[in-house]
Amino acid sequence: MAVTRRPLVPAAFTEFFGSARFASALSLVAVGVGFSTHAIRSVMGWPGLIGALAALVLLAAISFIAQRETIEWHGLLPISILVFVGWCALSIFWSNYQWATLAGIGYQMTFAFLGIYIALVRDAIQIVRVVGDVLRVLLSVSLALEVLSGLLIDLPIRFLGIQGNIALGGPIQGLFGSRNQLSIVALIAFVTFLVELRTRSVRPATAAASIALSVLCILLAHSPVIAAVSVLVGLATLALYAVRKVPANQRKYYQWGLAAITVLALVLAYVYRTRVIDLLNARSDFFVRYRLWIQIWQLIPVNQILGWGWVGGWPEDLYPFTAIQANTGAEHANGLNAYLDVYLQVGLIGVILFVALIALAFGRSWLLASNKRSVVYVWAPLVLVSLLVTSVFESSILVESGWLLLVVCAVKASQGMSWRSALPRHEPRPAGEGRG
């Protein structure tokens, strides 16, 4: 008599946690939490945020298990992500603040895991829709709270950091804690809403209203940082549009020419940096950053190769961060420059690995956008341009929503262009096959 073997995972479990609807809802919540960390901490504190992230990681792990037969695991992760995160984790052995390093690594890996989940269970257009839906809501709520604070009750909402300056024309902060962070989010939203419009994934009226909302938030934020970033994102958009129009057999020559022009522009921007700062009317803002960067640069040689130890966002009560803040006379949550921040925390080796990570992610996503017909592929390189240029003035790419987006873009780009795609692969089983 034949014995029927019961499946290791019940069919009901697989059908619920492995369903497309569950993956869509979980991705939406994960992106929402990633962009709402400041608001969540302001309302519920760190315990509330950690509890929310722990629940998301648990649900994502369960969903992975339920979809283990349908997900393509071949070349799952870009090696550049594994190596950079691994190096950050290794820094616990030489860190002078090991508990803080352990917490920072856990926080980094949490958002990396959620980014990997989103990248694997959602395709490109679904990711654009998820980010678009989240940012539509968060920017709308931010603007509504600014109106409430500045026009209706005429009082700041202190626990959220909202100053109520909208009656004066700004600057506003919304749910994101600072005008710079609001402007970065609004610029990413602008790119996302444009892609939604071009791909017709939302109604034209919704896309137009969303684009207007993002532009309004950028203007009211009054961020000198985002002015330069917006110009560069616009130039990248035009360059990508032009490259996509070039015949395929000539495209590589245009790509090399574009790379040479980009390098020349960066050199000229550095040579004439003072003039650029004056044009952007950002001298006072830049002076604050310059003082901070000088303090960081003086501490880097102490542990130049290995760094002081990874923490991500700066702790308030640990050396050398306390010394930097004492010497600058201001509190800083990060180094206001992602590259210097990485250099300080994980040394020269860490900087090399981080630059390799972002270079591979951007290079692959740019080539995919250049060669694929679908407009949806332009989203990743334009978001990466926003993050990478902003990284010269902010460190948001290293933590929370910035790191989440970097991981999503890197994984999706690796899926489309990876040397491991030439290796033998296991074809995933179609959804539903062998279940029940």
Image: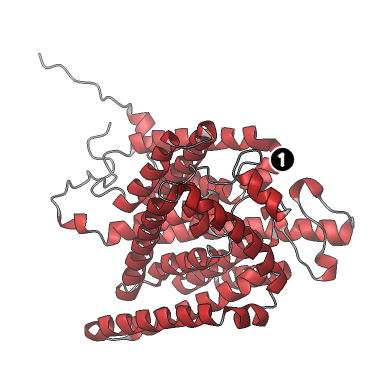
**Amino acid type of the residue tagged 1 in the rendering:** Val
Residue located at (41% from left, 70% from top): 378
Foreground residue, 226 or 324?
324
Q: Is residue 89 above or below residue 251?
A: above
User: In this orientation, does residue 78 appear?
Assistant: no
Quarter of the picture containing the C terminus is: top left
Residue located at (33% from left, 39% from top): 67
Is residue 414 found left or right of 212 in the rendered image? left
Q: Position of residue 109 (x, y in %)?
A: 44, 41
Crowd rating for badge 1 (residues with CA inside 10 Å; few <14, some 14–19, many 20+): few
Is residue 391 found left or right of 409 in the rendered image? right
- Residue 279: which quarter of the image? bottom right
- Residue 257: which quarter of the image? bottom left
Q: Position of residue 379 (x, y in %)?
A: 44, 67
- Residue extending farthest to the top is 1
Is residue 167 found left or right of 406 in the rendered image? right
Foreground residue, 307 or 162?
307
Q: Position of residue 45 (x, y in %)?
A: 68, 36
The count of marks equals 1
- Residue extending farthest to the left is 1
The colour scheme used here is secondary structure
> Which residue is labeled 1 in the image?
43
Q: Is residue 289 above or below residue 35?
A: below
Q: Position of residue 55 (x, y in %)?
A: 52, 33
Foreground residue, 393 or 309?
309
Residue located at (15% from left, 16% from top): 3
Residue located at (14% from left, 53% from top): 423
Please, what secondary structure does the residue beneath circle 1 have? helix
Foreground residue, 436 or 259?
259
Quarter of the picture containing the N terminus is: top left
Is residue 330 found left or right of 342 in the rendered image? right
